[in-house]
Amino acid sequence: MSTLRPAATRLADTIAAELEKRMLEGSLKPGDRLPAERTLALDMGVSRPCLREAMQKLVSKGLLTTRHGGGTHVTDRLEAHFVDPWQDMLKDHPLLHRDLLEFRQMLESQAAALAADRATDADLARLDAVHAALEASYSGDDLAVCIDADVAFHQAIAEAAHNVLIGHLTASLMRVIHGHVAGNLEHLHARPQRWNQLRAQHEAIWQAIRERNPEEAAQAARSHVEFVRQNIDDSALAEQRRLSALRRLGEGADSASGA
C-alpha cells in the first residue's frame, strides 16, 4: 500500500511554520543569518527546493530578508513596530519613563517567577553562563560590555519563562530603554556602594530561579527595577543641580564683567 507524499506547497508551508516557530521561541533572533541552504535543508530533513519555497514565503511576510552575496537574515519586524513609535514618544514625553519602568517591573517579575517554575536544565546552564559574564563585567571599566551583559542576563530570564510574548516583549523593551540602561549603569558605576547593590540584586534573582522559588524570584526582580527607578530619578536630579550650578556660575561671571 503506497503512502501519499505531501504536496510541495504544503510541505513548504510546514517548513515555513517551523522557521517561524524558531523565530518566536528566540532560537532565531533578529539579525541572525540563516545557515547555508544545504546545511539547513539537511538539518530539517527536507529538500532544498521546498526549503527555498518556504524561505520565499517568509521573505514575502517580511520575516526574512535576502542580501545579495550576504545570505538570508531574520528581520526585526516582530520588534520594530513596537520599538520605533515608543522610542519617539519617549523623547517627546518624559513622563512616560515612569510608566515604562512600571511596565518593566511587572514584566520582569512575572518572567522571573515563570523562569523559576519552568526553566529547563539547558535554560539554567545558559543563565549560569550569562550571569558569569555579567559578574565578570562588573570588575571592568567597559560600560558597553556591562550594558550588553545586563541585557543578555534579563533576556535569558525572559526566554527561560517559556512564554513567547514575554520573550519578545522583553527584547523590544530593552531596545526602547537602552538609553536608560546606559545612563543608569554609568551613574551607578561612579558609586561603588550602589554598584555592589546592583550586583547583589542580579545574584538574588539568579539564585531564586536556580532554587526554583517563584515568589522570591519575582520579589527580587521587583526590588531590582525599583532600585533602577530610584537611581534614574537620583541621576536626573543630580543633572538638574549640575546645570543649575553652571547657570549660576555663568550669571556670576556676567555680573562681574558688568560691574
Image: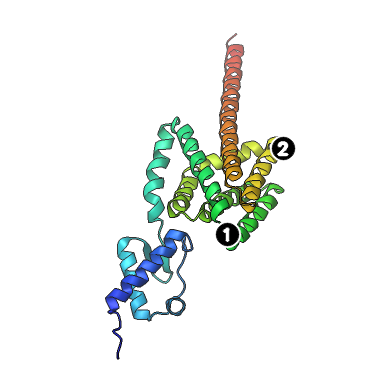
Q: Amino acid at mark 1?
A: Asp
* Cα distance between the residues tagged 2 and 1: 31 Å
Toward the top, the furthest residue is 259
Residue furthest bottom in the image: 1
Report the front residue among 224 and 207: 207
Q: Is residue 259 above or below residue 19?
A: above
Which residue sits at x=60%, y=25%?
A: 242
Q: Name the foreground residue: 204 vs 15.
A: 204
Name the spot of residue 18 as percent of width and height, x first. Answer: 39, 68
Q: Earlier in the sequence, mark 2 or mark 1?
A: 1
The answer to whether residue 127 is seen in the rendering is yes
x, y (%) of residue 220?
Answer: 61, 41
How many marks do you count on the picture?
Answer: 2
Q: Quadrant of residue 3?
A: bottom left
The quarter of the rendered structure image containing the N terminus is: bottom left
Q: What amino acid is labelled 2 in the image?
A: Pro
> Which mark, residue 58?
none
Q: Which mark is residue 123?
A: 1
What crowding class fits label 2: few (fewer than 14 Cα within 10 Å), some (14-19), or many (20 or more)? few
Give me the residue at 56% from left, 43% from top. Answer: 218
Disc 2: which residue: 192
Q: Residues within 10 Å of mark 1 (few under 14, many from 20)?
A: some
Q: Is there any visible trace of residue 67 in the rendered image?
A: no
Q: Is residue 184 above or below residue 139?
A: above
Residue 41 shown left or right of residue 8 in the figure: right
State left or right for residue 148 relative to residue 203: left
